[in-house]
Amino acid sequence: MRVAIVTESFPPEVNGVAHSVLRTAEHLARRGHQPLVVTPAPARGAHCPPRGFGAGAGAERIPVVHIPSMPLPGYPQVRIALPSRQLAAALAGHRPDLVHLASPFVLGARGMQVAARLGVPAVAVYQTDLAGYAHAYRAGRGLGEAAAWRRIRAVHRAAARTLAPSTPAAQDLTAHGVPRVQLWPRGVDSVRFHPRHRDEALHRALAPGGEVLVGYVGRLAPEKRVDLLAAASALPGVRVVVVGDGPSAPGLKASLPGAVFLGRRTGEELARCFATLDVFVHTGPLETFCQTIQEAMASGVPVIGPAAGGPLDLVAHHRTGLLVPPRDGAAVARAVAELAADPARRAAYGQAGRAEVTARTWEAVGDLLLRHYAEVLAEHRGLPPAVLPPPAAAPGAPVATPGEPVAPAPGAPVPAPGEPVAPVLPEELSA
């Protein structure tokens, strides 16, 4: 199968979209398919392969086409593709059987148009809460929430299938009029992210007084609400460590004077940072999935996350971690204090969290994606769906069989078209 992946982000950018596209392309190549990646060109001087990358030892290189781009105003780490004939030329030259649109908005919207002209079906992968971002960046004078949803609907309604990473994200799309929504979660590398990478020397260096090490890993941007760690950072016996970079870094360093900022970390160094934490906290309320929560769980670290979006699928409240009301710094501090005072519960949550995610491999979710592709191609060609065995799912993993309607979260009402869906919260959070 020839697949053209049109993505708004790709390495060297570090984010969930870029990482999942990389993993997807590698999996396609390993399964004998022929992927092409089309992405905005990185900033000049960025370290990345200019023409392709390998999918493993001895593998052929996967071609990458870089479209001319410009930095997003106010957030230069994010690149926006400029209008270019290269996109249409790249897709026509690759002769894809299917076009995969990763978090389509600018380049992806153009990719959808090109796919339609070529008569090729497109699968749109929803990964970014752009409407929520519009609100977080106060874009009311330009791109407001309503305008963002109009754009999302226009792109995704043209797709043969939309894949959402979590139950809440799927419900949100359906409630806003996006049809043909199915679930496709994300995998985690539980070999790289593993408790054995815990480094006691690093722990002593970061918390020389023996403090409980509480960490955030991710971009430092307004929508991530890392400022909500301020009250937790002031707790006695707690040391907050922040791993990542972004436009909010200067302000956060001023508002979290007791925290340690390590900057961007990748690879083995990142895995070591995760495993060395005593508690992982994610504060962003706009996550459609939240890959860093899975990586913390794989590392055997208990997690605290907002009871909104993707974390609702990932965190088993009072079993693998704690869910707190979103945008509530005091609630974050109370949860941190609760776990900081109870080492046995931290250990139990960490063990349960790792057990929850070890079967959620990138290979398993990659094969599930191929099943989605096969069904879309069968529908496009007017063929009956292929008879395939049901996919294997990790215990508790939010995986839906392709072709079946999205199942709401346990206890959630099935939404009528256009009806907003309230997430199902733990009982003590819904009062």
Image (cartoon, helix red, strand yellow):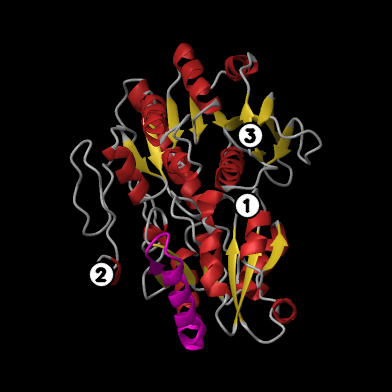
x and y, in percent, of residue 30 in the image: 60, 42
Asked whether residue 402 appears in the rendered view, the answer is no
Disc 1 to disc 2, C-alpha distance: 34 Å
Residue that carries the numbered disc 3 in the rendered image: 73
The main secondary structure of the magenta stretch is helix
Q: Is mark 2 on a helix, strand or loop?
A: helix
Q: Nearer the viewer, residue 76 or 81?
A: 76
Q: Earlier in the sequence, mark 3 or mark 2?
A: 3
Q: Position of residue 5 (x, y in %)?
A: 56, 31
Q: Is residue 231 above or below residue 360?
A: below
Q: What element carries label 1?
A: loop
Q: Which of marks 1 and 2 is in front?
A: 1
Alpha-carbon neighbours of circle 1 within 10 Å: few (<14), some, or many (≥20)?
Answer: some
The span shown in magenta is 323-348
Q: What residue type is labelled 1?
A: Ser
Q: Where is residue 122 in the image (x, y as percent from the top left)?
A: 44, 26
Whether 194 is among the magenta residues is: no
Badge number at residue 427: 2
Q: Tell me if residue 306 comes above or below residue 50 in the rendering.
A: below
Helix, strand or loop status at disc 3: loop
- Front disc: 3 or 2: 3
Give me the residue at 48% from left, 70% from top. 303
Query: Are dots 3 and 2 in contact, CB under 8 Å?
Result: no
The type of residue carrying mark 2 is Glu
